[in-house]
Image (cartoon, helix red, strand yellow):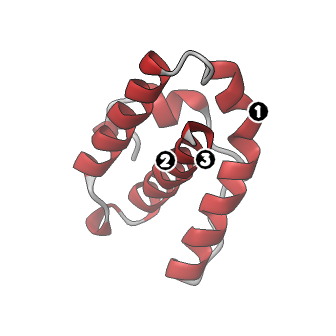
Amino acid sequence: MYKKTIQYLLTDLMYTHMKYKQMPYLSDKAKIDRLRMEIDDILTTQLTITREYLQSIWQDCFDAAQDEYTKESGFRYPYNEIGWNLVFELEVDSIL
């Protein structure tokens, strides 16, 4: 159950980052913080969900987020990847 939830949250977090980077006026910085906290809560409480697990689903989540971004915006996200640092560590205002 948690693996599906973490996959959904990670995809949503990546999508929100994509949207914020390309269309900051349409995105919600608070949502990025909330998604980060939800993922961190699962990582803290569910020992079977590790950073290694997140890395193993990273590309699938990126592909799903990119598809969602393309459907909403009508444009393909211009980058082929999104890094760990951007998703989990950078302050939201420094993403732009």
| Secondary structure under the numbered disc 3 in the rendered image | helix
Does the residue at mark 1 contact the one at mark 3 (Cβ under 8 Å)? no
Q: Residue furthest toward the left?
A: 30
Mark 1 vs mark 2, CA separation in Å = 15 Å
Q: Is residue 93 left or right of residue 95?
A: left
Using the image, tell me which numbered label, if any, was put on residue 4: 3
Camera-side mark, 1 or 3: 3
Mark 1 is surrounded, within 10 Å at the Cα level, by few (under 14), some (14 to 19) or many (20 or more) other residues, namely few
Using the image, tell me which numbered label, if any, was put on residue 9. Answer: 2
> Closest to the observer: 81 or 30?
30
Depth check, front residue: 92 or 10: 10
Q: CA distance from mark 1 to mark 3?
A: 13 Å
- Side of 88 where 67 appears, left or right: right
Give the mark nearer the N terminus: 1 vs 2: 2
Compared with 46, 88 (above or below) is below
Q: Residues within 10 Å of mark 2 (few under 14, many from 20)?
A: some
Q: Position of residue 35 (x, y in %)?
A: 37, 42
The CA span between labels 3 and 2 is 9 Å
Which residue is most to the bottom?
A: 74
Quadrant where the N terminus sits is: top right
Q: Amino acid at mark 3?
A: Lys
User: In the rendering, which numbered label is found on residue 38?
Assistant: none
Indicate left or right for 50 with 92 as reference. right
| Three-letter code for the amino acid on which mark 1 is drawn | Ser
What residue type is disc 2 on? Leu
Label 3 Cα neighbours within 10 Å, binned few <14 / some 14-19 / many ≥20: few
Q: Which residue is mark 1?
A: 56
- From what the image shows, is residue 14 above or below residue 42? below
Please give the name of the residue rendered at 67% of the width and 51% of the height, measured from the top-left corner. 62
